[in-house]
Amino acid sequence: MTARYQRQMILPGFGEQAQEKLACSKVLVIGAGGLGCPVLQFLTASGIGSLGVVDFDTVSLTNLHRQTLFSESDVGRKKVEVVKEKLKLQNSELKCEIYDFALEPSNAVDLIKNYDVILDCTDVLNTKYLINDVCALLKKPLVYASIYQFEGQISVFHYGKEPRNLRDLFPEISHYDAMASCEHTGVMGVLTGIMGNFQANEALKIIIGSGEVISGKILIYNNLKNEFQTISFPEKSGIFLARNQDEILRKNYDLNCTNIVHIDSLEDLQKILTVPSSVIVDVRNEDETPKVHGFSIKEIPLKDLDERFEELEQNEHLVFFCQSGVRSIKAIQLFQSKTSGKKLYNIRKGISLFQL
Amino acid sequence: MLNYTLKMQIKTFGKLTDIVTEPLEPEFPFSVKELRELLVLNYPVLNELDFKIAVNHQIVDEDTWIINKEDLIALLPPFSGG
Protein backbone atom coordinates (compact mmCIF):
# COMPACT_ATOMS: atom_id res chain seq x y z
CA MET A 1 0.00 0.00 0.00
CA THR A 2 1.26 3.46 -0.82
CA ALA A 3 2.80 5.87 1.63
CA ARG A 4 -0.17 8.20 1.44
CA TYR A 5 -2.10 6.15 3.98
CA GLN A 6 0.82 5.65 6.35
CA ARG A 7 -0.51 7.97 9.07
CA GLN A 8 -3.74 6.00 9.45
CA MET A 9 -2.11 2.60 8.92
CA ILE A 10 0.16 3.04 11.96
CA LEU A 11 -2.90 3.38 14.20
CA PRO A 12 -3.47 0.48 16.62
CA GLY A 13 -5.76 -2.09 14.99
CA PHE A 14 -5.55 -0.47 11.56
CA GLY A 15 -2.59 -1.64 9.49
CA GLU A 16 -2.33 -2.96 5.98
CA GLN A 17 -5.29 -5.30 6.29
CA ALA A 18 -7.67 -2.47 7.16
CA GLN A 19 -6.31 -0.37 4.31
CA GLU A 20 -6.83 -3.30 1.95
CA LYS A 21 -10.45 -3.62 3.11
CA LEU A 22 -11.02 0.06 2.29
CA ALA A 23 -9.44 -0.37 -1.14
CA CYS A 24 -11.73 -3.33 -1.90
CA SER A 25 -14.94 -1.71 -0.66
CA LYS A 26 -17.77 -0.26 -2.71
CA VAL A 27 -19.68 2.57 -1.08
CA LEU A 28 -22.81 4.30 -2.39
CA VAL A 29 -23.46 7.91 -1.38
CA ILE A 30 -27.01 9.06 -2.11
CA GLY A 31 -27.18 12.83 -2.25
CA ALA A 32 -24.21 15.11 -2.99
CA GLY A 33 -25.30 18.00 -0.77
CA GLY A 34 -24.47 19.23 2.72
CA LEU A 35 -23.98 15.74 4.14
CA GLY A 36 -22.71 14.18 0.95
CA CYS A 37 -19.80 16.57 0.32
CA PRO A 38 -17.82 15.85 3.53
CA VAL A 39 -18.71 12.16 3.25
CA LEU A 40 -17.29 12.01 -0.28
CA GLN A 41 -14.18 14.00 0.53
CA PHE A 42 -13.20 11.96 3.58
CA LEU A 43 -14.05 8.57 2.11
CA THR A 44 -11.99 9.45 -0.94
CA ALA A 45 -9.09 10.67 1.21
CA SER A 46 -9.13 7.54 3.36
CA GLY A 47 -8.69 5.24 0.36
CA ILE A 48 -12.12 3.77 -0.36
CA GLY A 49 -11.71 1.82 -3.60
CA SER A 50 -15.01 2.51 -5.30
CA LEU A 51 -17.56 5.25 -4.71
CA GLY A 52 -20.99 5.59 -6.31
CA VAL A 53 -22.66 9.01 -6.17
CA VAL A 54 -26.36 9.63 -6.85
CA ASP A 55 -27.75 13.13 -7.38
CA PHE A 56 -30.02 14.62 -10.05
CA ASP A 57 -29.46 18.24 -9.10
CA THR A 58 -27.28 21.07 -10.35
CA VAL A 59 -25.06 23.29 -8.20
CA SER A 60 -26.75 26.49 -7.08
CA LEU A 61 -25.38 29.55 -5.33
CA THR A 62 -27.29 28.75 -2.12
CA ASN A 63 -25.48 25.39 -1.92
CA LEU A 64 -22.03 26.91 -1.53
CA HIS A 65 -22.14 27.77 2.19
CA ARG A 66 -22.32 24.10 3.10
CA GLN A 67 -21.52 21.99 0.05
CA THR A 68 -17.76 22.26 0.18
CA LEU A 69 -16.95 20.33 -2.98
CA PHE A 70 -18.43 23.09 -5.12
CA SER A 71 -16.95 26.43 -6.17
CA GLU A 72 -18.55 29.56 -7.59
CA SER A 73 -17.56 28.53 -11.09
CA ASP A 74 -19.51 25.25 -10.66
CA VAL A 75 -22.89 26.99 -10.27
CA GLY A 76 -25.27 25.62 -12.88
CA ARG A 77 -23.27 22.44 -13.50
CA LYS A 78 -24.44 18.91 -12.75
CA LYS A 79 -23.41 18.06 -9.21
CA VAL A 80 -22.29 14.51 -9.98
CA GLU A 81 -20.01 15.70 -12.77
CA VAL A 82 -18.30 18.23 -10.54
CA VAL A 83 -18.04 15.60 -7.79
CA LYS A 84 -16.30 13.12 -10.07
CA GLU A 85 -13.83 15.74 -11.30
CA LYS A 86 -12.92 16.94 -7.81
CA LEU A 87 -12.65 13.48 -6.28
CA LYS A 88 -10.42 12.20 -9.07
CA LEU A 89 -8.11 15.16 -8.47
CA GLN A 90 -8.11 14.33 -4.78
CA ASN A 91 -7.30 10.63 -5.28
CA SER A 92 -6.45 9.28 -8.71
CA GLU A 93 -6.84 5.66 -7.54
CA LEU A 94 -10.54 6.14 -6.82
CA LYS A 95 -13.11 4.45 -9.01
CA CYS A 96 -16.05 6.84 -9.12
CA GLU A 97 -19.41 5.97 -10.71
CA ILE A 98 -21.92 8.78 -11.02
CA TYR A 99 -25.68 8.47 -11.33
CA ASP A 100 -27.36 11.61 -12.60
CA PHE A 101 -30.94 10.80 -11.63
CA ALA A 102 -33.30 10.80 -8.68
CA LEU A 103 -33.53 7.61 -6.65
CA GLU A 104 -36.93 6.05 -7.25
CA PRO A 105 -38.63 2.73 -6.42
CA SER A 106 -37.98 1.62 -10.01
CA ASN A 107 -34.19 2.08 -9.91
CA ALA A 108 -33.27 1.82 -6.22
CA VAL A 109 -32.88 -1.98 -5.95
CA ASP A 110 -30.68 -2.35 -9.03
CA LEU A 111 -28.44 0.46 -7.89
CA ILE A 112 -28.09 -0.38 -4.21
CA LYS A 113 -27.46 -4.09 -4.75
CA ASN A 114 -24.03 -3.34 -6.29
CA TYR A 115 -22.63 -1.69 -3.16
CA ASP A 116 -21.43 -2.86 0.27
CA VAL A 117 -22.31 0.15 2.40
CA ILE A 118 -24.95 2.81 1.70
CA LEU A 119 -24.93 6.38 3.02
CA ASP A 120 -28.17 8.32 3.08
CA CYS A 121 -27.16 11.95 2.54
CA THR A 122 -30.55 13.04 1.15
CA ASP A 123 -32.81 15.74 2.52
CA VAL A 124 -36.26 14.38 1.68
CA LEU A 125 -37.98 12.13 4.21
CA ASN A 126 -39.79 10.05 1.59
CA THR A 127 -36.52 9.21 -0.14
CA LYS A 128 -35.01 8.25 3.20
CA TYR A 129 -37.79 5.69 3.68
CA LEU A 130 -37.27 4.30 0.20
CA ILE A 131 -33.53 3.89 0.85
CA ASN A 132 -34.26 2.29 4.22
CA ASP A 133 -36.70 -0.22 2.75
CA VAL A 134 -34.40 -1.23 -0.08
CA CYS A 135 -31.43 -1.62 2.28
CA ALA A 136 -33.64 -3.75 4.57
CA LEU A 137 -34.60 -5.96 1.63
CA LEU A 138 -31.00 -6.35 0.42
CA LYS A 139 -29.50 -6.45 3.96
CA LYS A 140 -27.12 -3.59 3.22
CA PRO A 141 -25.73 -1.56 6.11
CA LEU A 142 -27.21 1.94 5.90
CA VAL A 143 -25.60 4.97 7.52
CA TYR A 144 -28.46 7.38 8.11
CA ALA A 145 -28.24 11.06 9.01
CA SER A 146 -30.72 13.89 9.12
CA ILE A 147 -30.67 17.53 10.14
CA TYR A 148 -33.11 19.96 11.71
CA GLN A 149 -31.81 23.49 12.23
CA PHE A 150 -29.07 23.14 14.89
CA GLU A 151 -29.49 19.42 15.47
CA GLY A 152 -28.42 16.32 13.62
CA GLN A 153 -29.37 12.66 14.04
CA ILE A 154 -27.27 9.69 13.05
CA SER A 155 -27.80 5.94 13.23
CA VAL A 156 -26.81 2.79 11.36
CA PHE A 157 -29.56 0.46 10.18
CA HIS A 158 -29.56 -3.12 8.82
CA TYR A 159 -26.19 -3.93 10.36
CA GLY A 160 -24.81 -6.50 12.75
CA LYS A 161 -26.36 -9.26 14.83
CA GLU A 162 -29.33 -7.17 15.92
CA PRO A 163 -30.08 -5.03 12.89
CA ARG A 164 -32.43 -2.11 13.26
CA ASN A 165 -34.66 -0.37 10.76
CA LEU A 166 -35.66 3.29 10.41
CA ARG A 167 -39.24 2.05 10.77
CA ASP A 168 -38.43 0.65 14.24
CA LEU A 169 -38.20 4.30 15.27
CA PHE A 170 -40.81 5.92 13.04
CA PRO A 171 -42.93 3.22 11.37
CA GLU A 172 -44.56 5.45 8.73
CA ILE A 173 -44.04 8.95 7.40
CA SER A 174 -46.69 11.22 8.81
CA HIS A 175 -48.45 13.45 6.32
CA TYR A 176 -47.27 16.50 8.22
CA ASP A 177 -43.63 15.45 8.26
CA ALA A 178 -43.67 14.65 4.55
CA MET A 179 -44.93 18.16 3.83
CA ALA A 180 -42.62 19.84 6.31
CA SER A 181 -39.76 17.95 4.69
CA CYS A 182 -39.86 20.28 1.72
CA GLU A 183 -40.23 23.58 3.53
CA HIS A 184 -36.62 24.58 3.50
CA THR A 185 -35.44 25.57 6.92
CA GLY A 186 -32.11 27.16 7.63
CA VAL A 187 -29.00 25.08 8.10
CA MET A 188 -25.44 25.86 9.11
CA GLY A 189 -22.70 24.52 6.87
CA VAL A 190 -20.65 23.30 9.80
CA LEU A 191 -23.50 21.16 11.12
CA THR A 192 -23.94 19.25 7.86
CA GLY A 193 -20.14 19.03 7.82
CA ILE A 194 -20.03 17.53 11.31
CA MET A 195 -22.88 15.09 10.68
CA GLY A 196 -21.42 14.06 7.32
CA ASN A 197 -18.13 13.30 9.05
CA PHE A 198 -20.01 11.20 11.60
CA GLN A 199 -21.43 9.26 8.67
CA ALA A 200 -18.04 8.76 7.04
CA ASN A 201 -16.70 7.58 10.40
CA GLU A 202 -19.44 4.94 10.77
CA ALA A 203 -18.91 3.77 7.19
CA LEU A 204 -15.16 3.33 7.78
CA LYS A 205 -15.76 1.33 10.99
CA ILE A 206 -18.26 -0.91 9.20
CA ILE A 207 -15.79 -1.62 6.39
CA ILE A 208 -12.76 -2.12 8.61
CA GLY A 209 -14.77 -4.08 11.16
CA SER A 210 -13.40 -2.33 14.21
CA GLY A 211 -14.79 -0.05 16.89
CA GLU A 212 -18.39 0.35 17.89
CA VAL A 213 -20.94 1.08 15.20
CA ILE A 214 -23.95 3.14 16.24
CA SER A 215 -26.57 0.46 15.67
CA GLY A 216 -29.67 0.13 17.85
CA LYS A 217 -29.11 3.69 19.01
CA ILE A 218 -29.62 7.11 17.54
CA LEU A 219 -27.18 9.90 18.34
CA ILE A 220 -28.47 13.45 18.40
CA TYR A 221 -25.97 16.32 18.33
CA ASN A 222 -26.79 19.97 18.97
CA ASN A 223 -24.13 22.30 17.61
CA LEU A 224 -25.32 25.40 19.50
CA LYS A 225 -25.22 23.72 22.89
CA ASN A 226 -22.48 21.17 22.15
CA GLU A 227 -24.83 18.51 23.49
CA PHE A 228 -24.75 14.85 22.56
CA GLN A 229 -27.57 12.52 23.45
CA THR A 230 -27.78 8.84 22.58
CA ILE A 231 -31.14 7.12 22.67
CA SER A 232 -31.46 3.37 22.24
CA PHE A 233 -34.50 1.82 20.62
CA PRO A 234 -35.83 -1.73 20.34
CA GLU A 235 -36.95 -3.66 17.31
CA LYS A 236 -40.60 -3.01 16.51
CA SER A 237 -42.98 -5.69 15.31
CA GLY A 238 -45.40 -5.23 12.45
CA ILE A 239 -43.41 -2.65 10.50
CA PHE A 240 -43.37 -2.63 6.69
CA LEU A 241 -40.68 -4.99 5.39
CA ALA A 242 -40.59 -5.56 1.65
CA ARG A 243 -40.03 -9.21 0.73
CA ASN A 244 -39.17 -8.45 -2.89
CA GLN A 245 -38.73 -5.63 -5.38
CA ASP A 246 -42.41 -5.70 -6.35
CA GLU A 247 -43.42 -4.74 -2.84
CA ILE A 248 -41.07 -1.75 -3.03
CA LEU A 249 -42.67 -0.77 -6.35
CA ARG A 250 -46.15 -1.09 -4.90
CA LYS A 251 -45.38 0.89 -1.76
CA ASN A 252 -46.57 4.45 -2.03
CA TYR A 253 -43.61 6.70 -1.27
CA ASP A 254 -45.34 9.74 -2.72
CA LEU A 255 -42.24 10.35 -4.79
CA ASN A 256 -43.90 10.05 -8.12
CA CYS A 257 -47.51 9.39 -8.87
CA THR A 258 -49.18 8.27 -12.06
CA ASN A 259 -50.04 10.71 -14.84
CA ILE A 260 -47.68 13.35 -13.60
CA VAL A 261 -45.34 14.87 -16.09
CA HIS A 262 -42.19 16.19 -14.47
CA ILE A 263 -40.69 19.41 -15.77
CA ASP A 264 -36.93 19.71 -15.44
CA SER A 265 -36.10 22.65 -17.70
CA LEU A 266 -37.34 26.16 -18.39
CA GLU A 267 -37.67 25.30 -22.10
CA ASP A 268 -40.19 22.55 -21.30
CA LEU A 269 -42.05 24.94 -19.07
CA GLN A 270 -42.23 27.57 -21.83
CA LYS A 271 -43.66 24.99 -24.23
CA ILE A 272 -46.50 24.15 -21.87
CA LEU A 273 -47.23 27.82 -21.31
CA THR A 274 -47.93 28.35 -25.02
CA VAL A 275 -51.22 26.51 -24.44
CA PRO A 276 -53.89 29.19 -23.72
CA SER A 277 -55.54 27.36 -20.83
CA SER A 278 -52.31 26.75 -18.93
CA VAL A 279 -51.46 28.09 -15.50
CA ILE A 280 -48.56 27.92 -13.05
CA VAL A 281 -49.58 27.38 -9.44
CA ASP A 282 -47.28 28.18 -6.52
CA VAL A 283 -48.45 25.98 -3.63
CA ARG A 284 -46.01 27.38 -1.09
CA ASN A 285 -47.26 29.43 1.85
CA GLU A 286 -47.71 33.15 1.12
CA ASP A 287 -44.68 34.15 3.18
CA GLU A 288 -42.21 31.80 1.52
CA THR A 289 -39.46 33.32 -0.60
CA PRO A 290 -38.00 33.83 -3.11
CA LYS A 291 -40.98 34.85 -5.21
CA VAL A 292 -40.87 33.97 -8.89
CA HIS A 293 -41.04 36.88 -11.31
CA GLY A 294 -41.37 36.96 -15.09
CA PHE A 295 -44.18 34.42 -15.17
CA SER A 296 -47.87 34.74 -14.51
CA ILE A 297 -48.30 32.74 -11.34
CA LYS A 298 -51.29 31.88 -9.23
CA GLU A 299 -50.51 31.54 -5.54
CA ILE A 300 -52.60 28.96 -3.71
CA PRO A 301 -50.95 27.43 -0.63
CA LEU A 302 -51.35 23.66 -0.47
CA LYS A 303 -53.41 23.93 2.70
CA ASP A 304 -56.01 26.12 0.90
CA LEU A 305 -56.06 24.19 -2.36
CA ASP A 306 -59.03 22.03 -1.40
CA GLU A 307 -61.35 25.00 -0.84
CA ARG A 308 -59.94 27.17 -3.64
CA PHE A 309 -60.12 24.31 -6.13
CA GLU A 310 -62.70 26.05 -8.33
CA GLU A 311 -60.35 28.94 -9.09
CA LEU A 312 -58.47 26.50 -11.34
CA GLU A 313 -61.47 24.83 -12.96
CA GLN A 314 -61.05 26.73 -16.25
CA ASN A 315 -57.46 25.62 -16.69
CA GLU A 316 -56.64 22.46 -18.63
CA HIS A 317 -52.87 22.43 -18.21
CA LEU A 318 -51.70 22.99 -14.67
CA VAL A 319 -48.08 23.31 -13.61
CA PHE A 320 -47.44 23.04 -9.87
CA PHE A 321 -44.34 24.05 -7.97
CA CYS A 322 -43.21 24.52 -4.38
CA GLN A 323 -39.84 24.92 -2.70
CA SER A 324 -38.39 21.53 -3.63
CA GLY A 325 -40.98 19.47 -5.48
CA VAL A 326 -42.64 17.60 -2.61
CA ARG A 327 -45.69 19.70 -1.84
CA SER A 328 -46.34 20.17 -5.55
CA ILE A 329 -46.77 16.39 -5.82
CA LYS A 330 -49.17 16.48 -2.86
CA ALA A 331 -51.09 19.20 -4.69
CA ILE A 332 -51.27 17.08 -7.83
CA GLN A 333 -52.46 14.06 -5.85
CA LEU A 334 -55.17 16.19 -4.28
CA PHE A 335 -56.10 17.46 -7.73
CA GLN A 336 -56.23 13.95 -9.15
CA SER A 337 -58.64 12.88 -6.44
CA LYS A 338 -61.06 15.63 -7.44
CA THR A 339 -60.83 15.81 -11.19
CA SER A 340 -59.85 13.93 -14.29
CA GLY A 341 -58.85 14.79 -17.83
CA LYS A 342 -56.63 17.70 -16.92
CA LYS A 343 -52.95 17.65 -17.72
CA LEU A 344 -50.90 18.00 -14.55
CA TYR A 345 -47.22 18.90 -14.39
CA ASN A 346 -44.80 18.94 -11.53
CA ILE A 347 -41.71 21.14 -11.41
CA ARG A 348 -39.54 18.46 -9.91
CA LYS A 349 -36.71 20.68 -8.70
CA GLY A 350 -39.09 23.21 -7.18
CA ILE A 351 -38.08 26.82 -7.05
CA SER A 352 -34.53 26.20 -8.23
CA LEU A 353 -35.79 25.62 -11.79
CA PHE A 354 -36.29 29.36 -12.06
CA GLN A 355 -32.59 29.92 -11.23
CA LEU A 356 -33.28 32.65 -8.71
CA MET B 1 -48.39 26.67 44.56
CA LEU B 2 -47.53 23.19 43.47
CA ASN B 3 -44.69 21.29 44.94
CA TYR B 4 -41.67 22.08 42.76
CA THR B 5 -40.41 18.49 42.82
CA LEU B 6 -43.50 17.43 40.91
CA LYS B 7 -42.52 19.50 37.90
CA MET B 8 -41.09 17.35 35.20
CA GLN B 9 -38.60 18.79 32.75
CA ILE B 10 -38.82 17.36 29.29
CA LYS B 11 -35.92 17.31 26.88
CA THR B 12 -37.10 18.07 23.37
CA PHE B 13 -35.52 17.83 19.94
CA GLY B 14 -36.23 19.30 16.54
CA LYS B 15 -39.38 21.30 16.04
CA LEU B 16 -40.81 19.99 19.33
CA THR B 17 -38.49 22.43 21.12
CA ASP B 18 -40.66 25.32 19.94
CA ILE B 19 -43.86 23.51 20.90
CA VAL B 20 -43.32 21.89 24.29
CA THR B 21 -42.08 24.87 26.26
CA GLU B 22 -43.39 24.39 29.82
CA PRO B 23 -42.57 21.66 32.34
CA LEU B 24 -45.47 19.31 33.04
CA GLU B 25 -46.88 18.77 36.49
CA PRO B 26 -48.17 15.23 36.51
CA GLU B 27 -48.92 13.02 39.48
CA PHE B 28 -46.30 10.33 39.76
CA PRO B 29 -46.13 7.51 38.99
CA PHE B 30 -47.85 7.45 35.64
CA SER B 31 -47.46 5.62 32.35
CA VAL B 32 -45.79 6.82 29.17
CA LYS B 33 -49.16 6.49 27.48
CA GLU B 34 -50.61 8.95 30.00
CA LEU B 35 -47.70 11.29 29.35
CA ARG B 36 -48.48 11.29 25.64
CA GLU B 37 -52.14 12.04 26.37
CA LEU B 38 -51.18 14.86 28.70
CA LEU B 39 -48.80 16.32 26.11
CA VAL B 40 -51.41 16.25 23.37
CA LEU B 41 -53.95 17.82 25.70
CA ASN B 42 -51.57 20.68 26.48
CA TYR B 43 -50.24 21.01 22.94
CA PRO B 44 -52.93 19.87 20.45
CA VAL B 45 -50.56 20.37 17.49
CA LEU B 46 -48.72 17.26 18.70
CA ASN B 47 -51.66 15.26 17.36
CA GLU B 48 -50.32 15.85 13.87
CA LEU B 49 -46.69 15.22 14.65
CA ASP B 50 -44.80 11.99 14.87
CA PHE B 51 -42.53 11.63 17.89
CA LYS B 52 -41.11 9.00 20.17
CA ILE B 53 -40.87 9.21 23.95
CA ALA B 54 -37.59 8.17 25.54
CA VAL B 55 -37.27 7.39 29.25
CA ASN B 56 -33.71 7.44 30.57
CA HIS B 57 -32.27 7.43 27.03
CA GLN B 58 -34.39 4.50 25.86
CA ILE B 59 -37.42 4.30 23.63
CA VAL B 60 -39.85 2.24 25.73
CA ASP B 61 -43.17 0.44 25.34
CA GLU B 62 -45.64 3.26 25.84
CA ASP B 63 -48.50 1.08 27.03
CA THR B 64 -46.70 -0.50 29.94
CA TRP B 65 -43.78 1.66 30.99
CA ILE B 66 -44.22 3.59 34.24
CA ILE B 67 -42.46 6.93 34.74
CA ASN B 68 -41.02 7.86 38.08
CA LYS B 69 -39.96 11.24 39.41
CA GLU B 70 -36.25 10.86 38.74
CA ASP B 71 -36.66 9.70 35.16
CA LEU B 72 -35.27 11.71 32.28
CA ILE B 73 -37.86 12.20 29.57
CA ALA B 74 -37.02 13.13 25.98
CA LEU B 75 -39.25 13.65 22.94
CA LEU B 76 -37.72 12.65 19.63
CA PRO B 77 -39.24 13.56 16.24
CA PRO B 78 -37.88 12.49 12.86
CA PHE B 79 -35.62 15.03 11.13
CA SER B 80 -35.51 15.28 7.37
CA GLY B 81 -32.86 17.80 6.33
CA GLY B 82 -29.47 17.06 4.86
Image: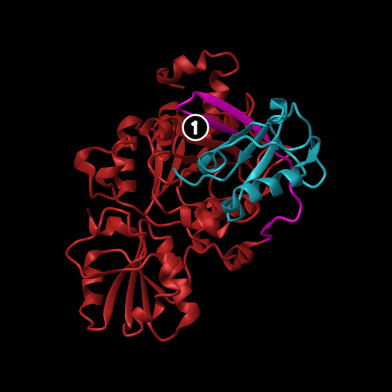
Q: Position of residue A60 (x, y in %)?
A: 26, 47
What secondary structure is marked by label 1? Answer: helix
The answer to whether any part of residue A111 appears in the image is no
Q: Nearer the viewer, residue A102 or A282?
A: A282
Specify the quadrant of the image occupied by residue A305. Answer: bottom left
Is A41 located above or below residue A55 in the figure? Answer: above
Query: Percent x, y for residue B20?
Result: 57, 41
Q: Foreground residue, A278 or A100?
A: A278
Instruction: Say if A65 sits above or below A348 in the image.
Output: above
| Residue bounds of the magenta highlight | A219-243
Q: Quadrant of the rendered structure where residue A243 is?
A: bottom right
The residue to which callout 1 is attached is A200
Q: Residues within 10 Å of mark 1 (few under 14, many from 20)?
A: many
- What residue do we see at 53% from left, 62% from top? A105
The amino acid sitting under disc 1 is: Ala
Image x and y of residue A103, in percent: 46, 56
| Residue A127 screen position, x and y as percent | 50, 54
Residue at horizontal 75 percent and vertical 40 percent from the top: B60
Residue A11 is left or right of residue A213, and the answer is left
Q: In the rendered view, does A81 fall on the left or right side of B30?
A: left
| Magenta segment includes A37 | no
Residue A238 among those drawn in magenta = yes
Instruction: Give the residue drawn at x 23%, y 46%.
Output: A75
Shown in red, the chain is A
Query: Magenta region, mostly helix, strand or loop?
Result: loop
The answer to whether residue A97 is visible is yes
Q: Colour of chain B?
A: cyan
Q: How many marks?
A: 1
Q: Which is nearer the eye, A209 or B53?
A: B53
